[in-house]
Each structure stands twice: as C-alpha cells, then as structure tokens.
Image: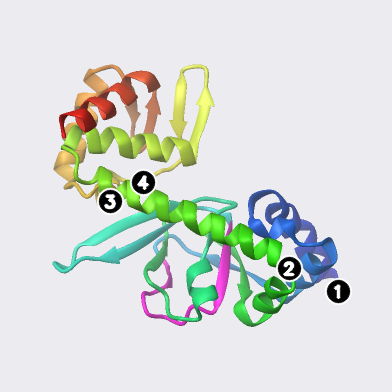
C-alpha cells in the first residue's frame, strides 16, 4: 500500500502535465498507475528490440533513451532521443503488434511502464483521450517526416536543423544562449544526423567558427539561434 501511494505521488504529476493520459479522471488515472511499475536501466542497456512484443507503454521518468533502427548496411540510425516526460510505445500498444524499433538507455534511466491489457479498456471508456492520442501520433509522424526531409539537405543544413530540433526538445535557455541538455558523443549525434563522426566534427567546427555555437566536451551551447536558423534556411533554399 505504501509503495502504491508513493508510486501515485511520483508518477501522477508526470502523467497529468506531460501526456495525453492527463485527460483521464483522477480515479481512472490512479487505478492505471497502481497497475503499472517503475523499472531502472543502466547506461547502454537495451530496453527492447525491434519485433519484441509491443505490450507496454513507457514514460521516461529520469535519464535519456534513444530510439534506433538498423539500415540495410547494418548501420545504426538514431530516430529520436527521449527525455523525462516523453512517452514511447503508443503505436505498438494501440496496434497490438510488435515493436517497430529498438530502445536503448543513453544514460542511467528510469521509466514507468503500463501494460496494454490495463490501458486499453480505460482508453476505450474515454474517447476524448483516444482523440488526444491520435493528435500526438500525428505530431510524431510530422516530426519523423521532417527528419527524413532534413536528411536530404547538405551537411551544413542537416547539422543546423538537427541542432535546432534537439534544442526544441532538450534546450535549456541561459543568459549566454540555449544549452542542449543532452550528453551524447559526436558518434551518437552522427547516427541521429545520418553523418559520419568525422563529418559531424567538421560541421560542428564550422558552426563554432561561425560563432553560432560553443562546444565543451559533449555539451553544445547555441549562442546565436537566429544565425543557426539562417544556416538551416540557406541550405534548404539551395535545394
């Protein structure tokens, strides 16, 4: 009972403020939470693999997780990074099919898991929440389409647009600019931008020389957001 109460107190604010589940009545949300569980993952641990059963909805409570796939050449492609408050697994849960990608912890992470068997009856009883899920999935589809489109740009534009996407999701505004609160190596960033590590290093160096970003280890600080947008826009207009 103490564990369930503690779980509700911790998870409820996340679900109400960050997810479509916030549209559920409190009693329904509380019932869902006590049926779920929290799981911890070590850095580099595989949370699930493509074609695993898609029977759980996952909400990130702490840490960072990457969603990946492997192309025909066996190269890992990073589709997205997830942060606290983000949900993953809606498509698999609603469709009742297997996972369409892999999920790997970028750092020590913690997630709250809800099983489809507990979630679906509640969603069916509250069609307004089902509508919100559809809207969320449409936004994710638009975002995925934008990533595919951006990957057709030349390297400078691809890098600039990728950094702007990450800034929108992970940016922390400071007096000196927008800091990306995402510690990933240039190799990992390359998998997200569909560039080699060497090309990522080269492009980041050029953006630094253009005085639009500052680099400190794995930390990236955008010091001229409008300038970065201009670089991204100039590349798009060339194409």
Q: CA distance from mark 3 to mark 1?
A: 47 Å
Q: Which type of secondary structure does the marked residue at label 3 adopt?
A: helix
Q: In the picture shown, does residue 10 fall above or below 37?
A: above
Residue at 41 percent across and 64 percent down: it is 104
Label 1 CA crowd tier, 10 Å (few <14, some 14–19, many 20+): few
Disc on res. 1: 1
List the residue tagged with mark 2. Answer: 126
Number of callouts in the render? 4
Q: Is residue 44 visible?
A: yes
Q: Which residue is mark 4?
A: 184
Q: Position of residue 2 (x, y in %)?
A: 85, 69
Front of the two marks 3 and 1: 3
Image-based side of 219 in relation to 86, left or right: left
Range of magenta residues: 45-60
Which percent across, then down, holds residue 47?
Answer: 45, 70
For the residue labelled by badge 1, is the local secondary structure a helix, a strand or a loop? Answer: loop
Name the side, left or right, on which 147 lies relative to 127. left
Residue at x 52%, y 53% (from the top left corner): 63
Q: Residue at x 32, y 56 (%)?
A: 78
Rate crowding at label 3 as few (under 14), some (14 to 19) or many (20 or more) other CA atoms within 10 Å.
some
The residue shown at (19%, 25%) is: 206
Q: Which residue is identified by label 3? A: 148
Q: CA distance from mark 1 to mark 2?
A: 27 Å
Indicate the secondary structure of the residue bearing disc 4.
loop
Which label's residue is closer to the chain start, 1 or 4? 1
Q: Image quarter for residue 8?
A: bottom right
CB atoms of marks 2 and 4 within 8 Å: no
Disc 3 and disc 4: Cα gap in Å?
A: 21 Å
């Amino acid at each position: 009972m103490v564990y369930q109460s503690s779980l509700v107190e911790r998870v409820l604010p996340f679900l109400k403020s960050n997810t479509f589940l916030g549209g559920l009545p409190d009693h329904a949300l509380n019932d869902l939470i006590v049926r779920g569980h929290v799981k911890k993952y070590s850095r580099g641990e595989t949370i699930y693999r493509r074609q695993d059963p898609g029977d759980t909805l996952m909400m990130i409570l702490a840490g960072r997780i990457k969603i990946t796939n492997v192309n025909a050449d066996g190269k890992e492609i990073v589709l997205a990074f997830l942060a606290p408050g983000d949900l993953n697994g809606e498509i698999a849960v609603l469709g009742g099919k297997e996972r369409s990608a892999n999920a790997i912890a970028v750092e020590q992470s913690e997630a709250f898991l809800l099983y489809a068997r507990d979630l679906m009856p509640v969603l069916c009883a509250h069609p307004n929440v089902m509508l919100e899920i559809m809207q969320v999935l449409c936004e994710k589809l638009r975002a995925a389409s934008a990533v595919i489109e951006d990957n057709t740009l030349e390297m400078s534009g691809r890098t600039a647009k990728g950094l702007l996407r990450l800034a929108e999701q992970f940016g922390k505004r400071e007096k000196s600019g927008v800091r990306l609160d995402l510690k990933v190596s240039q190799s990992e960033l390359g998998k997200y931008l569909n560039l080699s590590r060497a090309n990522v290093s080269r492009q980041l160096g050029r953006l630094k020389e253009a005085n639009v970003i500052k680099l400190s280890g794995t930390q990236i600080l955008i010091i001229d957001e409008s300038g970065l947008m201009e670089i991204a826009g100039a590349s798009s207009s060339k194409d």
